[in-house]
Image (cartoon, helix red, strand yellow):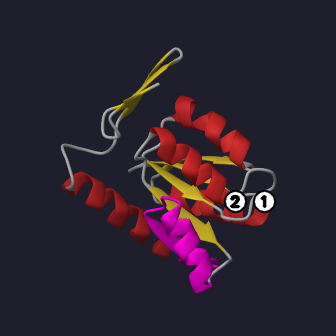
Amino acid sequence: MSRVLLIEDDPSVREGVELGLRRRGHDVRATATGEAGLAALAEFRPDLLLLDLMLPGMNGVQVCRRVRERSQLPIIMLTARGDDFDVVIGLEAGADDYIVKPARTEVIEARIRAVLRRMDDSGPGRPAIEVYGELTIDRVGLTVS
């Protein structure tokens, strides 16, 4: 299946989502802060980012914008904030989808498959980010940093 980076500060939600996705065959790396998640991006090289909106320190919108500066990595917001204003903020920051918690693992997995399917349909494959030392190449985002 896919490689998913989960950035979620609530330990019970983080462990539940991680366990549920692992049981369905996903390779999951979970972090509790935006800063730790950004650090894990280059090393783990996920196919998709599952991102909480309300994080300590750097919030989910800030993380999403930072990722979008360098990559077209698919991002799904997973958050308890479900009013229209928050949904618009998340999508405008660059998220590809938005899930309101609590959400069953089946729903999260279906959304992951849908977002990845759209990415597969839009080009020759999922966004590939290659890292060579301090050099990062994002072929879909057409950036090198």
Image coordinates for residue 80, horizontal then vertical, percent: 68, 76
Image coordinates for residue 30, horizontal then vertical, percent: 65, 48
Please, what secondary structure does the residue beneath circle 1 have? Answer: helix
Of the numbered discs in the image, which one, if any, rests on residue 49? none
Amino acid tagged 2: Arg
Q: Quadrant of residue 79?
A: bottom right
Residue 74 against residue 145 in the figure, above or below:
below
Give the residue drawn at x 80%, y 51%: 57
Of the numbered discs in the image, which one, if any, rests on residue 14? 2
Q: Residue furthest right?
A: 56
> Is residue 7 rendered magenta in the image?
no
Left or right of 76: which side holds 128?
left
- Residue ID for mark 1: 11
* Closer to us: 30 or 83: 83
Please, what secondary structure does the residue beneath circle 2 have? Answer: helix
* Closer to us: 115 or 109: 115
Give the residue drawn at x 73%, y 64%: 54
> Is residue 102 rendered magenta in the image?
yes
The residues colored magenta run: 83-103
